[in-house]
């Protein structure tokens, strides 16, 4: 339709990350989403994202191909999306998060399987009521509308799309992926919107096919799913969701580069790949990678211990805690023997944490904290992890002012993922020391929301 806007700029400030909304069949880039864009713009946790809606040709009128014009096939729309993302203003965005309704989700899937560049820029993909497995009876206009014909369950488009998705993207998408169904959606059944994907990627919200993308307010379940998916618990402040999303794409590029020759990596490559794997939710593979490296150097040894420590904190496996303690002690001994102050301080502070968190020995934890401070001072380097180590050590030695000062120095140098890691560990340490009153001060220092700090 000639009066349909091609690109709606809900918030365009030249940000590195953008949320892109795609409407469905016979929809509109403005009307389809209702207040969704405005609510996204008003959400503090999403303050560092630009927001756009993309329009394209789709209508209920009959296609008259070969005469003047007709609505394009979905495969053509996939190419259109890739092209729009490659030119201004979206080409300046390093990261794109997509929200797609109904047929827009098919258009998006087609673009992602066809364009490696688009896959590498996508950080989040959320499909609302998308007939990913097609529709049994797409419409009485089946023979007159190419877009409707493409959505049929037995259409060549759907068959090829599912094959290409499984071959190119599944089972571990290089982006955060969820598919969302309405509990009263009679147009797209769950067998089509949810079943093609693993249960871990499925969500169900209140509403029919249209209501799921028309929130009345921020309490709308579909809107809450989007915010949680985009933020991933990142909270607000200087280490917000958009910056973390940009970094997630950098981690995925590291995986794409290093994973194919993972058995040939040096220590630096092992560490980079392991941290990238964990950052995209593949912790078990990071542990296996480091555990099978022969022989691991000091840094891979510490990173392996760290992955085991984090898994113990999440799953409370005794064997993980004991193995982490053994590796940290081994690393400390080897670092001290090699006069490697940086590695010695790292292993010492982790020995202190494990002695307190797992062993329950406060006196031993203080001994290791004092060692960490001595080695940190000897390292002589002003770095994020040096200051983070000193902050944690001062917590174990009950010196809150010194701890906050050290953490402030670390925050000034930190990348978002580093700040997130430091904050989590600082809160754990404060909790172990019974310093509940310190947690809000840490939250303020790290720019976290009160909800994240609680």
Image: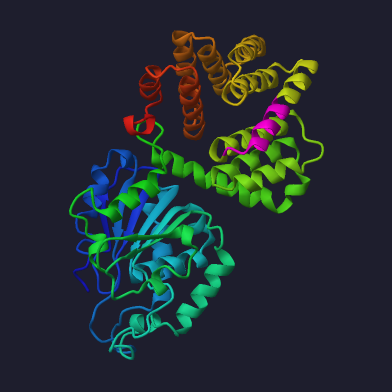
Magenta stretch contains residue 274:
no
Q: Nearer the viewer, residue 437 or 230?
A: 437
**How far from the left and from the top, in percent, is residue 394?**
53, 12
Q: Quadrant of residue 46?
A: top left
Q: Quadrant of residue 132?
A: bottom left
* Residue furthest out toward the bottom: 143
Q: Is residue 230 at least partly visible in the picture? A: yes
Mostly what secondary structure, the magenta segment? helix
| The N terminus, quarter of image | bottom left
Q: Nearer the viewer, residue 357 or 179?
A: 357
| The C terminus, quarter of image | top left
Q: Nearer the viewer, residue 117 or 359?
A: 359
Magenta stretch contains residue 320:
yes
Q: Residue at x 61, y 15 (%)?
A: 365
**How far from the left and from the top, in percent, is residue 27?**
24, 70
Q: Nearer the viewer, residue 126 or 292?
A: 292
What's drawn in magenta, residue-wise?
A: 316-328
Q: Is residue 282 left or right of residue 43?
A: right
Q: Residue at x 57, y 25 (%)?
A: 357
Q: Is residue 89 at least partly visible in the picture? A: no
């Amino acid at each position: 339709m000639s009066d349909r806007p091609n690109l709606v700029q809900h918030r365009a400030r030249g940000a590195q990350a953008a949320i892109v909304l795609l409407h469905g069949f016979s929809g509109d880039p403005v009307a389809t989403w209702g207040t969704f864009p405005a609510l996204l713009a008003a959400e503090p946790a999403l303050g560092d994202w630009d927001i756009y809606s993309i329009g394209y040709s789709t209508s209920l009128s009959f296609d008259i191909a070969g005469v003047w014009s007709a609505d394009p096939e979905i495969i053509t729309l996939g190419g259109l999306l890739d092209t729009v993302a490659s030119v201004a203003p979206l080409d300046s965005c390093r990261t794109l998060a997509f929200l797609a309704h109904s047929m827009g989700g098919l258009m998006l899937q087609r673009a992602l399987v066809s364009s490696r560049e688009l896959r590498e820029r996508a950080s989040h993909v959320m499909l609302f009521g998308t007939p990913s497995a097609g529709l049994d009876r797409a419409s009485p206009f089946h023979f007159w509308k190419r877009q409707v014909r493409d959505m049929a369950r037995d259409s060549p488009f759907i068959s090829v799309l599912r094959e290409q998705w499984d071959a190119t993207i599944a089972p571990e998408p290089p982006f955060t992926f969820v598919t969302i169904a309405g509990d009263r959606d009679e147009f797209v059944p769950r067998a089509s919107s949810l079943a093609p994907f693993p249960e871990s990627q499925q969500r169900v919200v209140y509403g029919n096919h249209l209501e799921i993308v028309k929130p009345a307010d921020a309490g709308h379940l579909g809107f809450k799913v989007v915010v949680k998916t985009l933020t991933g618990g990142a909270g607000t402040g200087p280490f917000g969701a958009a910056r973390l999303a940009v970094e997630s794409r950098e981690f995925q590029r590291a995986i794409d580069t290093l994973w194919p020759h993972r058995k040939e990596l040096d220590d630096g490559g092992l560490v980079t790949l392991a941290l990238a794997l964990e950052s995209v939710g593949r912790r078990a593979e990071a542990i296996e990678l480091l555990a099978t490296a022969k022989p691991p150097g000091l840094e891979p040894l510490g990173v392996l211990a760290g992955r085991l420590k984090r898994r113990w904190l999440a799953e409370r496996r005794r064997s993980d805690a004991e193995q982490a303690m053994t590796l940290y002690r081994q690393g400390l001994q080897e670092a001290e023997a090699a006069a490697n102050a940086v590695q010695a301080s790292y292993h010492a502070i982790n020995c202190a944490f494990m002695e307190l968190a797992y062993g329950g020995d406060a006196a031993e934890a203080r001994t290791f904290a004092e060692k960490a401070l001595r080695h940190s001072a000897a390292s002589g380097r002003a770095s994020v992890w040096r200051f983070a180590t000193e902050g944690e050590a001062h917590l174990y030695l009950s010196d809150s002012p010194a701890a906050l000062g050290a953490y402030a120095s670390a925050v000034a140098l930190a990348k978002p993922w580093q700040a997130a890691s430091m904050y989590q560990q600082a809160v754990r340490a404060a909790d172990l020391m019974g310093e509940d009153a310190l947690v809000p001060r840490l939250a303020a220092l790290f720019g976290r929301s009160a909800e994240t700090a609680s």
